[in-house]
Image (tube, rainbow, N blue to C red):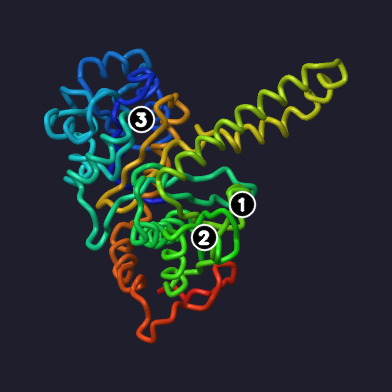
């Protein structure tokens, strides 16, 4: 996406490799023309910048924050007691309009708490959600929630679906996102009370709800938005990450096992590198928050410079999409969708049947 925006505020002290990897990623982004504000203890951040010979010509500035949220800190308490922590200061910059969005690889609970405390939620949003972009065979499907709301109610799944549909359409450019609920089967009798109630409501929503999808469907790209509770979503994501790591290791061992396989590996090196890049979580950079009044990205705690640079780029793309206002409009009918129709009969359309949404304005 093109167009100038305000800088992206980056928590220089978040993550296992902060501040070195964070500053390097910010410098790399700035060298590609992406404006950045590094937030953290000023002397320490400037010392790190000096190592990269980041001159004043780069669109990069430093904003001081005297405190840091540690991984063992309680998220809510840290946001209130450490009022000048780097995560909160990033959100303050977003709230004031000085920054178009923020990125942090720090305490994810603190990032969520800071987003709610400083930015607030659009009218009608019950709970914000964490979105993950999946490395599918085609497209860039989203899955939410990835851990923000573990004990979901039907209203949460319904709103996740509506917010995810907006994000997919506005940020990823999918004309009519196909939305599904993650379940243990495609039939309408499968799932739980939670998924069945949410599915019944979403069949009446003005979106292209295609019913249930199964775990095997997560990476096919046949669905654009996959909705689940935060516990299931987080387990599914970590399972995919672990599987990718194991498959990669199996592949390495197989290609090194014989002379013939080594030759085959050399001949297929370009294809293998392409596959590796496709499934590399660092290429995604971070997980956006939806359901707050601003752009925020949570990056992996192990983020290196590449992951940070990509998170900054994606945060910029999200900011340019101006999707926040549409979130409130999308969730406005969510409670009504959960009400039983006047005749007392639930919608008869099964979850596996596709329905077509009305044209988007």
How packed mark 3 is, by other alpha carbons closer than 10 Å (few <14, some 14-19, many 20 or more), is many
Is disc 3 in contact with disc 1, using a CB cutoff of under 8 Å? Answer: no
Q: CA distance from mark 2 to mark 3?
A: 29 Å
Residue at 29% x, 52% y is 127
- The answer to whether residue 348 is left or right of residue 79 is right
Circle on res. 297: none
Q: Is residue 81 above or below residue 161?
A: above
Q: Quadrant of the C terminus?
A: bottom left
Q: Nearer the N terminus, badge 2 or badge 1?
A: 2
How packed mark 2 is, by other alpha carbons closer than 10 Å (few <14, some 14-19, many 20 or more), is many
Q: Is residue 319 visible?
A: no
Position in image of residue 243 (x %, y %): 61, 33
Q: Nearer the viewer, residue 312 or 242?
A: 242
* Residue of label 1: 217
Q: Is residue 323 above or below residue 339?
A: above
- The answer to whether residue 68 is left or right of residue 265 is left
* Residue of label 3: 105
Q: Nearer the viewer, residue 30 or 348?
A: 348
Q: Nearer the viewer, residue 288 or 124?
A: 124
Residue at 42% x, 43% y is 231
């Amino acid at each position: 996406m093109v167009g100038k925006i305000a800088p992206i505020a980056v928590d220089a002290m978040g993550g296992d490799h902060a501040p070195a990897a964070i500053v390097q990623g910010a410098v790399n982004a700035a060298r590609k023309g992406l404006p950045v504000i590094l937030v953290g203890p000023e002397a320490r951040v400037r010392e790190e910048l000096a190592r990269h010979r980041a001159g004043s010509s780069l669109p990069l500035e430093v904003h001081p924050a005297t405190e840091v949220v540690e991984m063992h800190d309680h998220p809510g308490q840290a946001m209130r007691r450490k009022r000048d922590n780097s995560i909160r200061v990033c959100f303050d910059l977003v709230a004031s309009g000085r920054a178009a969005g923020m990125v942090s690889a720090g305490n994810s609970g603190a990032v969520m708490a800071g987003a709610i405390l400083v930015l607030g939620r659009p009218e009608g949003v019950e709970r914000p959600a964490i979105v993950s972009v999946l490395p599918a065979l085609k497209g860039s499907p989203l899955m939410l929630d990835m851990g923000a709301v573990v004990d979901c109610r039907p209203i949460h799944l319904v709103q996740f679906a509506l917010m995810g549909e907006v994000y997919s359409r506005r940020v990823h450019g999918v004309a009519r996102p196909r939305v599904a609920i993650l379940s243990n089967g495609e039939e309408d009798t499968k799932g739980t009370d939670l998924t069945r109630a949410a599915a019944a409501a979403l069949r009446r929503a003005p979106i292209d709800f295609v019913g249930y999808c199964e775990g095997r469907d997560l990476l096919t790209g046949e669905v654009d938005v996959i909705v689940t509770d935060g516990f299931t979503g987080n387990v599914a994501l970590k399972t995919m990450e672990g599987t990718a790591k194991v498959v990669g290791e199996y592949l390495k061992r197989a290609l090194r096992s014989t002379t013939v396989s080594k030759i085959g590996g050399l001949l297929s090196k370009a294809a293998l590198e392409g596959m590796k890049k496709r499934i590399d979580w660092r290429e995604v950079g971070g997980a956006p928050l939806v359901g707050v009044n601003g752009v925020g990205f949570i990056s992996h705690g192990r983020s290196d410079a590449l992951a940070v640079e990509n998170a900054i780029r994606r945060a910029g793309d999200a900011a340019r999409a101006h999707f926040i206002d549409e979130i409130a409009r999308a969730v406005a009918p969510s409670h009504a969708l959960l009400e039983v129709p006047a005749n007392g009969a639930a919608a008869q359309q099964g979850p596996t049947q596709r329905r077509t949404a009305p044209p988007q304005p």
